[in-house]
Amino acid sequence: MRDIRDLNFEELRTALAGENEPAYRAEQVFAWLYQKGASSYAEFTDLPRALRDRLAERFSLRPLEVVEVRSSIDGTSKTLFHLADGRLIETVFIPSGARRTICLSTQAGCKFACAFCASGLHGFHRQLTPAEILGQVLHQRNSLDVDLTNLVFMGMGEPLDNMDNVEHALRVLNDPRGFRFAARRITVSTCGLVPGIERFAKINLQINLSVSIHAADDETRTRLMPVNRRYPLSELISACEGYLGGGGRKITFEYVLLKGINDRPADAERLARLARRLRAKVNLIAFSPVAGLPFERPERASVDEFIRRLKNKGVGATLRSSKGSDIQAACGQLAGSAPAD
Ligand code: SF4
């Protein structure tokens, strides 16, 4: 049975019109689902009982099932969810100063097999539905009882490879009848899927785009990110230029520093050239070790030198602390594994 959160607003309105319900019912249902975070039809107390029963016969409304929550000493927490078909996904809550960020998964597994990332280690299983993407936000907001300030689509999977469902979720998150989440506080990340960036550019929302660049020459990038073979840097940068269009939009580069692989002075110089071309800010993350992956964290001195070179070239660069590494919740560590009990 289809989950009611897999319906966009227009589909919901059509479904309710078919039940001979007045037009305002769709807004009431959206408010119960996304503003009040109801997890059962019984909570829709201002709807007639007969309508609630008919909705329950046609559409499921199941909260995500939590398997385990792990909490880091730095305040980060990682929730492992069990989906209806047995697949496991992870969502991370990252408090930092005044920011309370949720990092969302968009696929069970990942097709893209980036060499430094745990999510791609076991291959791709399936796309997450809109209900499963939105369900992560609903669960975190309800269980943590905090006002979320930022949403990042940087968990398991490649968001632009699940564009239909991600776009659906983004529209509900931003909709004043839905979550009412400001678009500029939402960031979607991509490993560099050029057709996805081109399509994302056509979504009329001011959502931030973050490009996981991780190397500024094709040879190193192909070694780290096989997707670069299909969409090399020249095509990726052109697509990013198209995304920037006439202005108003911004691109951020994500760059995981791997000792001896992409942290050399020449890497910083090449990265600075690409960043200047797109006026992109660079978020640097020192690699967090993942069991089974052959990479090391660089020394602090080489990280500082890398940043200095970017800044010397006029590029805004920030070293982000990759939080939650003690619970395998840091960038690149999400694998959707069953708990080790
Ligand atoms: S970095 Fe992103 S695209 Fe690459 S394997 Fe991990 S989840 Fe997939």
Image (cartoon, rainbow, N blue to C red):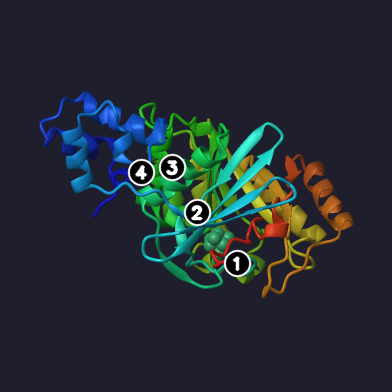
| Of callouts 1 and 2, the N-terminal one | 2
| Of callouts 3 and 4, the N-terminal one | 4
Q: Give the alpha-carbon distance from disc 2 to disc 4, as whole Å.
A: 14 Å
**Mark 1 in CB contact with mark 4 (< 8 angstroms):** no
Which residue lies at the image location 38% right of the left edge and 37% below the top edge?
38
Label 2: how many Cα within 10 Å (few below 14, some 14–19, many 20+): many
Could you say which quadrant of the image residue 12 lies in? top left
**Mark 3 in CB contact with mark 4 (< 8 angstroms):** no
* Mark 2 residue element: loop
Q: Nearer the viewer, residue 135 or 260?
A: 135
Amino acid bearing label 4: His
- x and y percentages locating residue 108 in the rendered image: 45, 62
* Some atom of ligand 1 lies within 8 Å of the CB belonging to the residue at label 3: no
Q: Which mark is residue 260?
A: none
For disc 2, the marked residue is: 105
Amino acid bearing label 3: Ala
For disc 1, the marked residue is: 118
Which residue lies at the image location 23% right of the left edge and 24% below the top edge?
24
Amino acid bearing label 1: Ala
| 10 to the left or right of 177 | left
* Some atom of ligand 1 lies within 8 Å of the CB belonging to the residue at label 1: yes
Label 1: how many Cα within 10 Å (few below 14, some 14–19, many 20+): many
Could you say which quadrant of the image residue 331 lies in? bottom right
